Amino acid sequence: MSRPHEKLEVWKKGIGVVTEIYALTKRFPDSEKFGIVSQLRRAAVSVPTNVAEGAARHNDREFLQFLYISSGSLSEIDTLLTISKELNYMSEGQYGKLKEQAGEVSAILQGLMTKLTEKTK
């Protein structure tokens, strides 16, 4: 049985960001295990999980609220990626790839949020 969120492109791409971030942060220094690694992973997981929870609510206003939380988590990811790059925990290529993936998720998310906002007016 398919759940409503499994059909959403933003959820699918959000899962992709999670897997990339987990793979990347495995190579971060051990000293960051409870710092940047933990925070980056939590923010990444927050994106698709909030999409999923919102989609299950069957109420556009509630769904929209969960999408705003996902959007905030994407901003957190963006900041943590920048910090990680500045600390040389990742290469420019890794940084660029993740920024691009997160940007795709953000664009889809913003489109969905706009659609739901117009629908709830």
Image: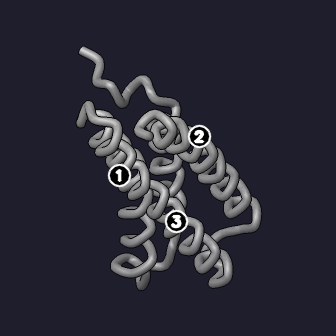
Q: Is residue 69 left or right of residue 20?
A: left
* Amino acid type at image mark 1: Gln
Image quadrant of residue 80? Answer: bottom right
Front residue of 17/9: it is 9
Spatial CA distance of label 1 from label 3 is: 19 Å
Q: Is residue 97 left or right of residue 65?
A: right
x and y, in percent, of residue 41 in the image: 40, 62
Residue at left 44%, top 57%?
A: 44
- Give the CA distance from mark 3 to mark 2: 19 Å
> Which residue: 49% across, 79% down?
29
Closer to us: 80 or 24: 80
* Secondary-structure class at tag 1: helix
Which callout, 3 or 2, points to the residue nearer the camera? 2
Image depth: mark 1 or mark 3 in front: 1
| Mark 3, residue position | 77
The residue indicated by pointer 1 is 65
Give the percent coordinates (x, y) of residue 107. 63, 46
Residue under label 2, please give it. 111
Q: From the top left corner, tell me how far across and down residue 119 is, in percent.
A: 46, 33
Q: Of label 2 and label 1, which has the lower sequence position?
A: 1
Q: Are there few (<14), some (14-19), or many (20+) residues within 10 Å of tag 3? A: many
Q: Is residue 78 above or below residue 115?
A: below
Residue 59 vs 25, above or below: the answer is above
Residue at x-position 28% and y-position 35% = 59
Quarter where residue 96 is shown: bottom right
Q: How is the image coloured?
A: one colour
